Image: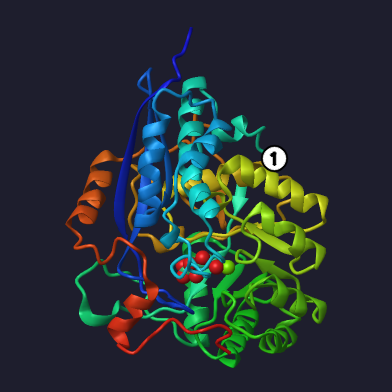
Amino acid sequence: MTRNMTITEVRLTPILVADPPLLNTQGVHQPYTPRLIVEVVTADGISGFGETYGDGKYLELARPFADRLVGRQVTDLNGLFTVADEVAVDAARVDNQVDVGGLRGVQTADKLRLSVVSAFEVACLDALGKALGLPVHALLGGKVRDAVEYSAYLFYKWADHPGGVACEKDDWGAAVDPAGVVEQARRFTERYGFTSFKLKGGVFPPDEEIAAVRALAEAFPGHPLRLDPNGAWSVETSLKVADALSDVLEYLEDPALGTAAMADVSLRTDVPLATNMCVTTFAEIKEAFARDAVQVVLSDHHYWGGLRNTQQLAAVCRTFGVGVSMHSNTHLGISLAAMTHVASTVPDLHHACDSHYPWQSEDVLTRRLAFEGGKVAVSDAPGLGVEVDRARLEFLHRRWLDDDGSLRDRDDAAAMRVADPGWVAPAVPRW
Ligand code: GKR
Ligand code: MG
């Protein structure tokens, strides 16, 4: 049978999804977070879906990108990068050195483009897989494991969003001290079976975060533990924390900001350092690896430019004896499916991947993905193996349409100012 895999239509649906009041060094998550759902439709009427950041700067790129895709083939994955090169980035969007909302390092035009490419690449792979009757992992060369392990992503959090705003209420309660963090971890294990834990730090003075990790180590002896302050500490503070937790940490993630500072820390500690902030593009790899600044790179298909680039990153890491793990930002089930497919194909994945998914009570899927024993089973169904609930998608899009604009760009510092009007995102190093 001849298939027509020409892209005849591309639909972009920006949405707002409920997000709990999770704390990080920049502030607190807003009650709703923007995401963009990308749908490519082929001449045969097959739809493929992808998901990425939904802030204005991504939408501005996604629209001209989508227009250029019509008439191309879903098989032309390399061509997506050519299309990306043609899409201009507003210079004003990339002058900030640290991406406040994403906490993921220096923001460049290329990085913005790649974050958009990733959603289209995933959508094309989903459509291609459905057309061929093959799962996405098969299009990537085939899975080497049947399930992908994820870590419990622990956050300091408040019970409610500040300011009494009307929004979805979560049932996790507050976690602002070691006991609260341990209780949150317990609930993660009970609900999802996670056995490895990551605490988002950079929120409280380092001694308090050391105490929280110590409490986790006591409550879950022998389990892999990570702490990630998103570059909030000086080199000296990073070394102090590394020293205090050296016997319990699997790795310390971005204790200090940038390759130079990470290299300084790395030189003076045996605790492995991981990053999703100083190695976020291929161009940043050479210096970081040459200086032995990091021992683990957290891939993220959203900002590395898709699933195949993630495989390439893993190959480079393997070549240099650097480990691979996976970073996550707020995301829904389409992205979790994509993360799981690509992670299933990476041979040397020895760390549990991060996922914010348990924090999202809303989704655009008819059936949410499940964690069992801390793992997501790798689907063998065609494409990503997920089905989009169009009514849910429309509902979440309606919320985006109805928003007065205040939530369409993620801004954790603005959310924090509701509780603390004088708050400005702290300069780094904070401690
Ligand atoms: O969602 O608050 C958050 C995280 O801090 C996120 O923005 C980071 O990008 O989770 C991420 C990380 O590992 O750095
Ligand atoms: Mg991180």
Please state which of residues 194 and 13 is positioned toward the viewer in this rendering. Answer: 13
Query: So how many labels did they put on this image?
Result: 1
- How many other residues sit within 10 Å of disc 1, few (<14), some (14-19) or many (≥20)? few
Q: Secondary structure at mark 1?
A: loop
Which quadrant of the figure has residue 228? Answer: bottom right
Q: Position of residue 86 (x, y in %)?
A: 48, 39
Which quadrant of the figure has residue 231? Answer: bottom right
Which quadrant of the figure has residue 320? Answer: bottom right
Name the colour scheme.
rainbow
Is residue 188 visible to us here? Answer: no
Which amino acid type corresponds to the residue marked 1 in the rendered image?
A: Val
Please state which of residues 78 and 372 is positioned toward the viewer in this rendering. Answer: 78
Give the answer, above or below, for where 201 lies relative to 236.
above
Q: Which residue is mark 1?
A: 144
Q: Position of residue 373 (x, y in %)?
A: 57, 56
The C terminus is located in which quarter?
Answer: bottom right
Q: Residue at x 36, y 65 (%)?
A: 410
Q: Position of residue 32 (x, y in %)?
A: 30, 64
Q: Position of residue 257 (x, y in %)?
A: 62, 75
Would residue 428 be found to the left or right of residue 94 on screen? Answer: right
Is residue 179 visible to us here? Answer: yes
Would residue 209 be found to the left or right of residue 89 on screen? Answer: right
Q: Residue at x 46, y 46 (%)?
A: 116
Does the numbered disc 1 mark a residue whose Cβ is under 8 Å from ligand 1?
no
Give the answer, above or below, for where 270 lies relative to 81.
below
Would residue 328 be found to the left or right of residue 93 on screen? Answer: right
Q: Residue at x 60, y 85 (%)?
A: 215
Would residue 17 be found to the left or right of residue 263 on screen? Answer: left
Please state which of residues 153 and 429 is positioned toward the viewer in this rendering. Answer: 429
